[in-house]
């Protein structure tokens, strides 16, 4: 569809719906699409409870053939707001971040602003800040904002418990006991069919409250030069490993990799983002990790692991004779230290929220570590050990109570993964050297090292991969760049399974609305007004697909609960 024509058609449908709802919702619309509620202070519907507002949202056409809002859906959005006594247009301030999520984020949120304002129900202000500020301020200062998610491990739980448990990493004040109970139950349900049913039920329950709004699902994309004979392995573990890459059929050749991802910290306790995790998976070992091409965790530092008979303890035997690159001993004490400090530091930008099922860690001897769990037979525990909370650090270098600075980590050579860090200029350039003593699941590196360049603009990364200055481009090129590079003779585009999602976060306490019922109604009306099809096709040229629930398509338990409930 022609971009301008598509936008004009979308505008026409929204404007028609907005004009049509004046008689049904008691709204007066101006010619420019603004609206005014005649007397919200005396509207007796302001006391509508959560269930009643949700029933209204479900009252229109139930078709799920498209994620594009229908006129009936948009009329329903106005009715939800009117029933909750919300005066329109509602003023929304939405934060987004193109330097972390790619240049297309500006176009994506520009399209969302246009979609919401064309209903006449919202006035939208968009703000953007650099990622360092964005990541620090989002919890306390942003009421509605963009986030993306690249999964920690390939399981539906990783799209649910970390988002919707009490004290989740979003910090958006969402806490519903029925949701928490379902999260807890699915984590200990060993029957696959029964667990899938619980995951389906859990998403349907969360969709009532909309603490986040799922928008798009992406896939892994890397661009490689024709000189790269061994491309990165892009598999369902969603980890980007340096070791598998080789160019010119030369195991000593240094490979140049470009990315627009940014790094928050080398300390695994102080970061929970793609850029940081990419580095950490290549320089730190884990108790369990993913071998290339296999999404099932396998022993790395461990020789073997097993659950106790009652399922409450998970015991691992650690390989003997392990060393850090600096010569320090690597044993079970480092493992305990690493998990203990995650829980002690509990940095808001860190992954400690993944350890909700961990009660304590004990070390009977230097080669044995015991993880004592809050609930028996946690089916996600092995995946968690291979997730961003799983990197093991040197207990002689890292602080037990606070984050350790990057420069101190590099100076101490506190690495035992497939690579060590030779030079480090955060978010500028980094050099990685193969670790000759590494014997983990990634295998010995097939190259002589990696030089990683961090780009502020994806356009510069695209020029350097096409010119041959870089050998690999990894996250994130624009959809237009990818489409163009597909036809280039100088490079190849490599795809992997897609677990990445894009979504909108609502702070359920600080977002617009005078009461919880009004805040819910505003979230519901937003959900009913956004056209995912337009975002997918016009903004991302189909490289991202509409996401209609919390678990993306392809994982057990995925459904379309959000689009079903909000009639898209």
Image (tube, rainbow, N blue to C red):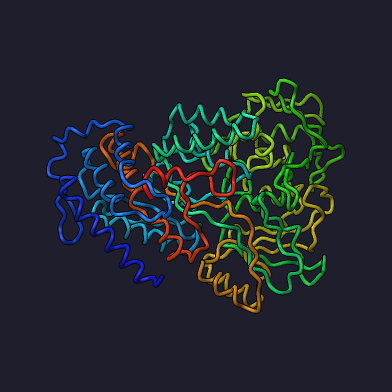
259 or 430: nearer the eye?
259
456 or 305: nearer the eye?
305
Evaluate whether residue 404 shows in this view. no
Looking at the image, which residue is at 25% across and 32% down?
Answer: 48
How far across and how far down the image is residue 340, in percent? 65, 31
- Classify 1 as above or below 381: below
The image quarter in which residue 372 lies: top right
Looking at the image, which residue is at 58% across and 59% down?
Answer: 427
Looking at the image, which residue is at 78% across and 33% down?
Answer: 305
Looking at the image, which residue is at 38% across and 56% down?
Answer: 68
Q: Is residue 514 left or right of residue 498?
A: left
- Classify 480 as above or below 183: below
Q: Is residue 185 left or right of residue 285?
A: left
How far across and how far down the image is residue 260, in percent? 56, 62
How far across and how far down the image is residue 523, in percent? 34, 43
Evaluate whether residue 1 shows in this view. yes
């Amino acid at each position: 569809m022609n971009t301008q024509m598509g936008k004009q058609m979308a505008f026409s449908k929204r404007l028609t719906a907005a004009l049509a709802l004046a008689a049904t919702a008691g709204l007066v619309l101006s010619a420019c699409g603004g609206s005014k509620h005649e007397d919200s202070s005396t509207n007796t519907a302001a006391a509508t409870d959560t269930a009643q507002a949700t029933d209204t949202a479900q009252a229109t056409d139930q078709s799920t053939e498209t994620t594009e809002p229908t006129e009936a859906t948009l009329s329903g959005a106005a009715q939800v707001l009117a029933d909750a006594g919300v005066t329109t247009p509602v003023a929304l301030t939405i934060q987004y971040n193109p330097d972390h999520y790619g240049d297309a984020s500006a176009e994506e949120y520009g399209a969302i602003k246009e979609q919401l304002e064309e209903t006449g129900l919202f006035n939208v202000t968009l703000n953007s800040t650099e990622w360092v500020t964005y990541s620090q301020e989002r919890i306390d200062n942003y009421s509605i904002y963009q986030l993306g998610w690249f999964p920690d491990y390939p399981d539906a739980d990783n799209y649910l418990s970390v988002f919707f448990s009490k004290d989740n990493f979003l910090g958006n004040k969402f806490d519903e006991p029925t949701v928490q109970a379902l999260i807890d139950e699915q984590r200990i349900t060993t029957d696959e069919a029964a667990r899938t049913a619980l995951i389906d039920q859990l998403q349907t329950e969360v969709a009532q409250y909309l603490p986040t709004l799922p928008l798009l699902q992406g896939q892994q994309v890397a661009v490689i030069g024709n000189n790269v004979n061994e491309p990165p392995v892009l598999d369902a573990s969603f980890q980007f490993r340096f070791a598998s890459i080789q160019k010119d059929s030369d195991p000593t050749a240094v490979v140049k990799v470009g990315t627009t991802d940014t790094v928050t910290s080398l300390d695994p306790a102080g970061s929970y983002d793609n850029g940081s995790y990419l580095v950490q998976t290549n320089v730190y070992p884990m108790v369990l990790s993913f071998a290339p091409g296999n999404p099932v965790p396998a022993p790395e530092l461990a020789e073997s692991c097993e659950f106790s008979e009652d399922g409450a303890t998970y015991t691992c035997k650690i390989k003997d004779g392990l060393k850090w690159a600096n010569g320090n001993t690597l044993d079970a004490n480092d493992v305990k230290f690493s998990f203990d400090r995650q829980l002690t530091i509990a940095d808001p930008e860190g992954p400690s929220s993944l350890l909700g099922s961990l009660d304590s860690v004990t070390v009977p001897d230097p080669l044995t570590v015991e993880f004592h769990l809050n609930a028996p037979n946690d089916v996600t525990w092995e995946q968690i050990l291979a997730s961003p909370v799983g990197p093991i650090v040197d207990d002689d270098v890292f602080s037990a109570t606070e984050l350790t600075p990057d420069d101190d980590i590099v100076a101490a050579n506190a690495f035992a993964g497939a690579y060590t860090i030779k030079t480090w200029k955060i978010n500028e350039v980094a050099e990685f050297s193969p670790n000759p003593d590494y014997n983990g699941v990634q295998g010995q590196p097939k190259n002589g090292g990696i030089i990683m360049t961090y780009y502020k603009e994806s356009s510069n990364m695209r020029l350097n991969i096409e010119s041959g200055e870089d050998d690999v481009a990894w996250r994130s090129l624009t959809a237009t760049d990818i489409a163009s590079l597909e036809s280039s003779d100088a490079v190849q585009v490599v795809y992997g399974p897609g677990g990445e999602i894009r979504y909108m976060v609502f702070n359920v306490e600080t977002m617009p609305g005078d009461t919880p019922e009004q805040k819910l109604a505003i979230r519901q009306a937003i959900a009913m007004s956004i056209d995912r099809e337009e975002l997918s096709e016009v903004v991302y040229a189909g490289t991202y697909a509409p996401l209609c629930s919390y678990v993306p398509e392809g994982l057990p338990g995925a459904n379309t609960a959000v689009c079903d409930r909000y009639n898209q």
